[in-house]
């Protein structure tokens, strides 16, 4: 917990919502800063200015040594060595914070389809007006079979894709949800909103669950995030039919 930041906000009579509005970020981002996550330099400078205090007062541990180990790109918020290490709360926060769109591009995404709570969350966001687009691998397609062989999983991926398709179909009764199947060769799985993108790398010989995940800030000027967003849209528009 960042006690110094919390104290400075209290002295300025500002809530996490107030700070978020001033800095143009999500209130949940401010709460992550309060819990101890270190903001990027531009946010640290803006916070210090807003709270009329010194940066070193809010982050006493901030030093040149820490700066030297800062991420090479501010676009990348964090990196997980394996998808299974991504906390469920991160997935829930990703989808619950969406106000305009949610996109899921996978071969199966069974870990989401098999989570009744997340399925309910996706349905609730659609009912609130968020456009939900889900792209699942066609279980009968060659790319899905090929990926299963590359993962050394045999026909398991085909079975997972079929199972996920059946589970995701429960959302089709909700306006705002559209599900399509694709036969695209995926080099990564993409989970996006208008604010953030989680990219699950596909590595030869490893299942997606054991491969790295990169979390990218989509609110920054066009760049890294839009590369993946365009890829999602390309697959979507090249897939003509929806599931029934």
Image (cartoon, grey):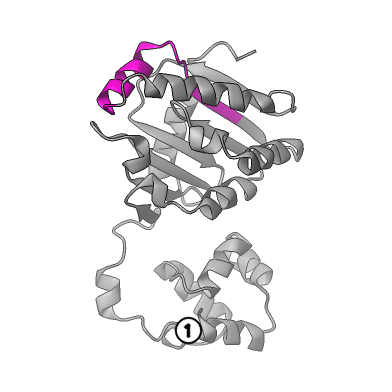
Give the image location of residue 98, x and y in percent. 62, 46
Using the rendered image of the protein, determine whether residue 223 is visible from the camera's viewpoint. no
**Residue 148 falls inside the magenta stretch:** yes
**Residue 141 falls inside the magenta stretch:** yes
Classify residue 148 by image quadrant: top left
Give the image location of residue 124, x and y in percent. 72, 40
Q: Residues within 10 Å of mark 1 (few under 14, many from 20)?
A: many
Q: Residue at x 38, y 58 (%)?
A: 74
Q: Residue at x 36, y 36 (%)?
A: 208
Q: Residue at x 33, y 56 (%)?
A: 73
The correct choice, above or below, for 127 with respect to 89 in the image is: above
Q: Nearer the viewer, residue 67 or 123?
A: 123
Label 1 belongs to which residue?
58
Classify residue 10 by image quadrant: bottom right
Q: Nearer the viewer, residue 153 or 198?
A: 153
Give the image location of residue 186, x and y in percent. 36, 26
Q: Which residues are magenta?
A: 133-152
């Amino acid at each position: 917990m960042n006690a110094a930041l919390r104290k400075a906000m209290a002295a300025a009579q500002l809530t996490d919502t107030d700070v978020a509005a001033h800095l143009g970020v999500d209130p949940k981002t401010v709460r992550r800063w309060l819990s101890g996550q270190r903001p990027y330099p531009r946010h640290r400078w803006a916070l210090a200015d807003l709270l009329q205090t010194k940066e070193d007062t809010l982050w006493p541990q901030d030093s040149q040594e820490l700066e030297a180990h800062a991420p090479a790109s501010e676009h990348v918020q964090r990196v997980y060595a394996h998808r299974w290490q991504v906390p469920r709360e991160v997935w829930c926060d990703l989808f619950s914070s969406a106000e305009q769109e949610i996109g899921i591009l996978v071969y199966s995404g069974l870990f989401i389809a098999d989570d009744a709570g997340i399925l309910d969350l996706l349905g609730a966001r659609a009912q609130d007006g968020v456009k939900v687009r889900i792209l699942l691998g066609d279980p009968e397609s060659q790319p899905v079979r090929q990926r299963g062989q590359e993962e050394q999983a045999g026909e398991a991926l085909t079975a997972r894709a079929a199972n996920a398709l059946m589970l995701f179909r429960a959302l089709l009764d909700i306006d705002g949800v559209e599900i399509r199947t694709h036969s695209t060769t995926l080099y990564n799985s993409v989970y996006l909103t208008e604010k953030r993108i989680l990219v699950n790398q596909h590595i030869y010989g490893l299942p997606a669950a054991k491969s790295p995940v990169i979390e990218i800030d989509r609110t920054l000027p066009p760049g890294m995030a839009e590369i993946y967003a365009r890829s999602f849209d390309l697959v979507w528009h090249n897939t003509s039919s929806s599931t029934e």
